[in-house]
Image (tube, grey):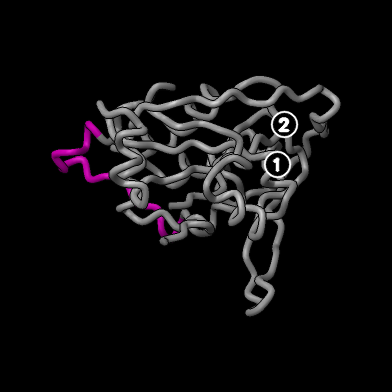
Amino acid sequence: MIRYSQALVPVAVLSLATIVSGCGHTNAAPSVSSSHVRHVAATTVALPHHLSNTQWYPPAVTKHYPITGAAYKVPSDTGLQMWSSNPTLAVLAVFNHLSRATTIQQVEEYSDPSFWPGIRHEWTFPNPHSPWYHEMRKPLTAQNVESMPASRSPYAGVIQRQYGPEILDHSWVLATGQPGQAFTTWYKKHPALTPWYYFVNVRGHWLLYSIQN
């Protein structure tokens, strides 16, 4: 099993993410009362690369692996919001922005700060001269993805161990298949090639923070 948990997005995964788009099933999100939504005042965050609207990017939190002690970044719980209705379309819109990005800054704008360090080292973009280029950049629709709360996803245990139960509880996930093919059909044939994209809602903005497959 290959894990892409700290912004490791090799070209194979990114290409798969943008080409793949099976169509699938959208699971209904649980209804959450407004009392579970955190209303946190925006604070200005100084960023080195001058993203727009930086006030809603809380700084990442540093954690350490229990055995090695190596440090890694996770999303902050500042400003996390739960969904009150199914957020598939909103999360999918962010995914489509990511799949059409042409610069690192565009990827960072739709990602959590904990994801930024690896993006700058690992994220690659499709080659405009590739015969698959236009297919890879086609936007997906709600029929092209599997969508669910992260707690129901195959990597829920991985997310909880690495990021903690609160991040898991506030996360939504999209899985993508291949254009023109039902997600269930794709997944039965290629479960190991199916990427799962994990997002959190920070002050009303869905941000990518992990990719697992």
Disc 1: which residue: 169
The N terminus lies in quadrant: bottom left
Q: Position of residue 149 (x, y in %)?
A: 61, 35
- Of the residues shown, which amino acid type is indicated by label 2? Met
Q: What span is in magenta?
A: 120-135
Horizontal placement of 52 versus 136: left or right?
A: right
Reply yes or no: does residue 103 show up in magenta.
Answer: no
Place residue 78 in its image quadrant.
top right
Q: Residue furthest front?
A: 188
Disc 2 is placed on an element classified as loop
Left or right: where 163 falls relative to 154: right
Q: Which residue is mark 2?
A: 82
Q: Are marks 1 and 2 in contact (CB under 8 Å)?
A: yes
Answer with the quarter of the image where residue 35 lies. top right
Return the residue nearer the eye: 145 or 92. 145
Q: Position of residue 29 (x, y in %)?
A: 63, 25
- Tally of marks: 2
